[in-house]
Image (cartoon, helix red, strand yellow):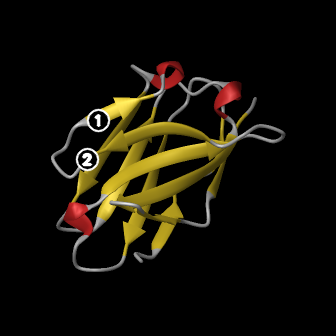
Amino acid sequence: QVQLVESGGGLVQPGGSLRLSCAASGSIFSMYVMGWYRQAPGKQRELVATITNGGSTNYVDSVKGRFTISRDNAKNTVYLQMNSLKPEDTAVYYCNARLGLVASWGQGTQVTVSS
């Protein structure tokens, strides 16, 4: 399994921006489908965005036009650029790596959107 370490979370005012990073171990990072999920207090974990090994992206409707997922295979890193943040984006954000039926998770990073 691949090891994942997220960073970049924090406190931001509504309308602000943050960029999350997820660094992965291993030499076959480029083969993984990478994703960002989030879990707000009292709610189920939800998929935010995914990016395939070919670069195709998918987003949950609530973040379309505001969030951008990208990957740098040379750095074994996936990013989530979050703009126009809203209080409802507050959650712990988790990085996910999937190859076939095997999935790995990071430890999560807290994002809080509040004035």
Q: Badge 2: few (under 14), some or many (20 or more) residues near its Cα, within 10 Å? A: some
The residue that appears at 72% across and 40% down in the rendered structure is: 44
Query: Residue at image x 41%, y 44%?
Result: 80
Q: Residues within 10 Å of mark 1 (few under 14, many from 20)?
A: some
Amino acid, disc 1: Thr
Where is residue 33 drawn, in percent x and y? 31, 53
Quadrant location of the N terminus in the rendered image: bottom left
> Does label 2 or label 1 sit earlier along the sequence?
2
Q: Is residue 5 above or below residue 14?
A: below
- Give the camera-side residue of 110 and 39: 39
Residue farthest along the front direction in this orientation? 101
Coordinates of residue 114 in the picture (x, y in percent)? 74, 32
Question: Left or right of 67: which side holds 31?
Answer: left
Q: Is residue 84 left or right of residue 59?
A: right
Numbered badge on residue 57: 1
SS state under label 2: loop
Q: Are marks 2 and 1 in contact (CB under 8 Å)?
A: yes
Front one among 38 and 23: 38
Pick whichever, 78 or 104, lies toward us. Answer: 104
Is any atom of residue 8 visible in this view?
A: no
The residue positioned 57% from the left and 28% from the top of the image is 85
